Amino acid sequence: MNTTMTMKAESTPLLAIDGKCATLTLNRPSRRNSLGDDDLRTLLAHFDTLNAHPDVQVVVLTAITTGHAKPVFCAGYHVGGFESDEHDPNFFEQIPDALERLRPISICAMNGSVYGGATDLMLACDLRLGLFGAELRMPAAALGLHYYPSGLRRYVSRLGLNLAKRAFLTGKAIPLEALQSANLFEALLSADDFDAGVQACVQGVLSMAPLAMQSTKASLNELAAGHYHEEALRAREVLTANSRDFAEGRQAFAERRPARFEDGSGGS
């Protein structure tokens, strides 16, 4: 996964599916991968495709950073969009909300700095890998904007209240190294080690039982959002307990070998 490669032409985000792994790539490096409404609509369409594709178990979100003196994963929402007569102030938040709800496990391969609304795309992913020397900046209050509710929830649940306040109430750039006190990233990697680190993370996810991973992800996100539905949690517990994956996991453990899990359908 070479995210610094030169693309033939800049475009809305690209989707590539390779067996159990899919890659979503932001592809506007000349404008630091800032997102316009066309990009956001394309992301929503790609999310629908991924949710409907049963073979995909993990999705990597990354960006093309060719030509950047200091790599930028995404500069956030394109500010020109705020001036449009057709601007919907509630549209952007639909994208991180939908990303958080994706059926497959999502990994943000954040190969550069992240700003504005794009910070919430990073937080909406299940796992994150960052680039040494990159930074996060949330300038909403500096622009006069109160952020949308689900984005604030993700900031507080992922970073904790103090770091969330630091991001929003100072508007200053925060080095990714300073965010590691919140265990936000699986790892911070050098540019030379980045692709290998992403692949190792992908393979780690693919080694897990997909039905258990996807159902547990849904339950953890509900709990983080303050929604406790014991009946739904119990139903997922029973589903996995009766699945072929759980039978295979127990047998593999007894035989001291890697498990060979199914595709996530989990039938008994």
Image (spheres, rainbow, N blue to C red):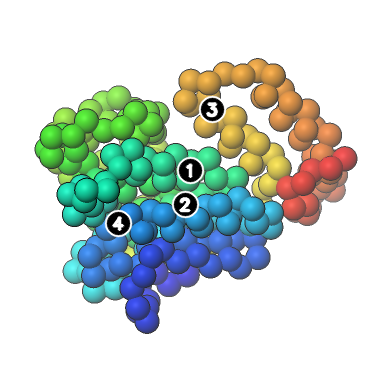
The C terminus - image quarter: top right
Question: Reading the chain from its start, which is encountered first: label 3 or label 4?
Answer: 4
Callout 1 amino acid: Ala
Task: Please tell me whether residue 236 is drawn above or below residue 84 in the rendered image.
Answer: above
Q: Which mark is first along the chain, 4 or 2?
A: 4
Name which residue lies at 48% across and 43% down: 98
Query: What element does badge 1 sit on?
Result: helix
What amino acid type is highlighted by mark number 3?
Answer: Glu
- Work out whether residue 140 or residue 241 is closer to the camera in this orientation and state it: 140
Q: Could you say where residue 60 lies in the image, as x and y percent from the top left?
A: 49, 57
Q: Are marks 2 and 3 in contact (CB under 8 Å)?
A: no
Nearest the camera: 234 or 261?
A: 234
State which tag comes first along the sequence, 2 or 3.
Answer: 2
How far apart marks 3 and 4 lie (CA) works out to: 29 Å
Residue in the image at 17% along x and 45% along y: 173
Answer whether labels 1 and 2 touch (C-beta < 8 Å). yes
Q: Would you identify the image quadrant in which residue 239 lies?
A: top right
Name the residue carrying label 4.
36
Which residue, given by chain and number where applicable, does mark 3 sit on?
222
Residue at which label 1 appears: 98
CA distance for labels 1 and 2: 7 Å
CA gap, disc 1 and disc 4: 17 Å
Q: Is residue 255 above or below residue 236?
A: below
For badge 4, the amino acid type reads: Gly
Q: Kindly indicate whether the residue at mark 4 contacts the one at mark 3 (C-beta within 8 angstroms).
A: no
Which circle, 1 or 3, is nearer the viewer?
1
